[in-house]
Image (tube, rainbow, N blue to C red):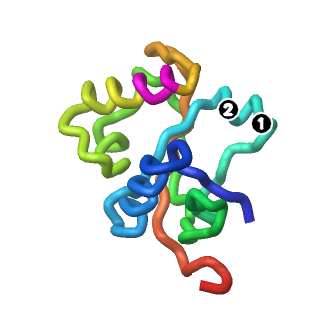
Amino acid sequence: MRALELGTIGEMRERLNALVLAGRKTATTGLLAEYVEETEGLEFEGERLALLGNDGDCVATIEITGVELTSFGGVTWEHATAEGEGDRSLEEWRTGHRRFWEGIGTPVDEDTPLVCLRFRLSPPCAGR
């Protein structure tokens, strides 16, 4: 089973995982360039992924319910709200995500290719 690590290690990952476990976060967005760099194929509808915590242990299993390739400027409000992070507008979502990606050394513009994932909680990780 492949894994999904949300955000960066530390408080951000804990917060995002808590949103998933509470059912508030049912989507996430990644840079297509990261898939290319890691030579990793895109997720697919029905695929189950281990959601990893800061220690690398599985905290939940999610099932992919949708995969969409779009540009940074093409992300919809519907997707942004499904991320469950409390953004009050699409512009607020864009500002926060632009700041995050710039902070990890990958500035984005309106044409930057993204992967938008939708998911739901699935039966728990093995051994949980």
Residue 96 on image: x %, y %: 35, 30
61, above or below 44, in the image? below
Residue 4 on image: x %, y %: 61, 54
- Element type at mark 1: loop
Report the magenta stretch's main SS. helix
Residue 106 on image: x %, y %: 57, 20
In the drawing, does residue 101 fall left or right of residue 46? left
On residue 34, which mark appears? Answer: 2
76, 38: nearer the viewer = 38
Q: Which residues are magenta?
A: 98-103
16, 73: nearer the viewer = 16
Amino acid type, callout 1: Glu
What residue is at 51 percent from the left and 44 percent from the top?
7
Instruction: List the single residue furthest toward the left.
Output: 88
- Element type at mark 2: helix
What residue is at 77 percent from the left and 36 percent from the top?
38
Residue 94 on image: x %, y %: 34, 26
On residue 38, which mark appears? Answer: 1
> Which image quadrant is residue 46 in?
bottom right
What residue is at 62 percent from the left and 77 percent from the top?
125
In the drawing, does residue 93 fall left or right of residue 57? left
